[in-house]
Image: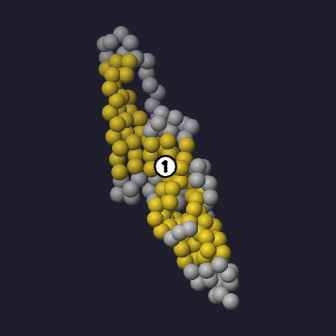
């Protein structure tokens, strides 16, 4: 993790780069030119912010003979860099509906698939967007959520 302490001086220029990785996650890299108070030196300060995950798959199962809402295991968004505190927002990207994040504004959440009939599998993809105290935004890789009802029906 890169931790940046802004030195005393005047900010002359901020360069912000948002990098979209192959897994569709977004990381932010900022370079800041700071002029010392005496005007003699320009220093570059770097800030980095990205968002990882404790897992990229969340699974939930049940063996009900009726339709049922099934909850997956939890996944946690893990910020790297940036400045605390962070805010979080989990969002449905694609897949079967209805499917939802149970704690959509927390770092950790489980997902729930609704109306899962016996013998049915439902899947969905979610991402988490985090914003740090400086307003930098990072997006996690996608989480694959899968719920299965192993029941055999009535």
Can you give x and y, in whole percent of width and height, for residue 72 in the image? 61, 66
Q: Is residue 33 above or below residue 61?
A: above
Place of residue 55 in the rendered image (x, y in percent of width and height, measured from the top left): 52, 60
- Whole-percent x, y for residue 110 in the image: 61, 60
- Which residue is identified by label 1? 129
Residue neighbourhood size for the residue with mark 1, other residues' Cα within 10 Å, grouped as few (<14), some (14–19), many (≥20): many
The image's colouring method is: secondary structure
In the foreground, 65 or 32: 65
Q: Is residue 42 left or right of residue 112?
A: left
Residue 107 located left or right of residue 49 = right
Dot 1 falls on a residue whose secondary structure is strand
**Residue 7 in the image, given as x and y percentages of width and height:** 43, 21
Work out which quarter of the rendered image holds the C terminus and state it.
bottom right
Q: Do we see residue 20 in this rendering? A: yes
| Residue 50 placement, left or right of 87 | left
* Rendered residue at 37%/35% (across/down): 30
Please, is residue 13 above or below residue 102 in the view? above
Residue at (46, 65) in percent of width and height: 94
Seen at 52% across and 35% down, the residue is 133
Taking depth in this image into account, of 54 and 137 the one nearest to the observer is 137
Look at 50% across and 39% down and name the residue there.
Answer: 132
């Amino acid at each position: 993790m890169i931790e940046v302490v802004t030195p005393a001086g005047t900010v002359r220029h901020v360069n912000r780069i948002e990098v979209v990785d192959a897994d569709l996650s977004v990381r932010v890299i900022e370079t800041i030119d700071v002029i010392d108070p005496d005007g003699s030196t320009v220093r570059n300060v770097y800030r980095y912010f990205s968002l990882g995950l404790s897992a990229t798959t969340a699974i939930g199962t049940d063996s009900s003979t009726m339709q049922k809402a099934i909850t997956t295991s939890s996944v946690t968004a893990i910020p790297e860099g940036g400045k605390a505190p962070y805010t979080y927002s989990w969002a449905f990207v694609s897949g079967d509906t209805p499917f939802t994040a149970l704690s959509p504004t927390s770092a950790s959440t489980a997902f729930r698939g609704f109306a899962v009939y016996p013998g049915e599998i439902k899947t969905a993809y979610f991402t988490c967007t985090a914003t740090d105290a400086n307003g930098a935004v990072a997006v996690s890789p996608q989480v694959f959520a899968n719920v299965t009802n192993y029941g055999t029906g009535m």
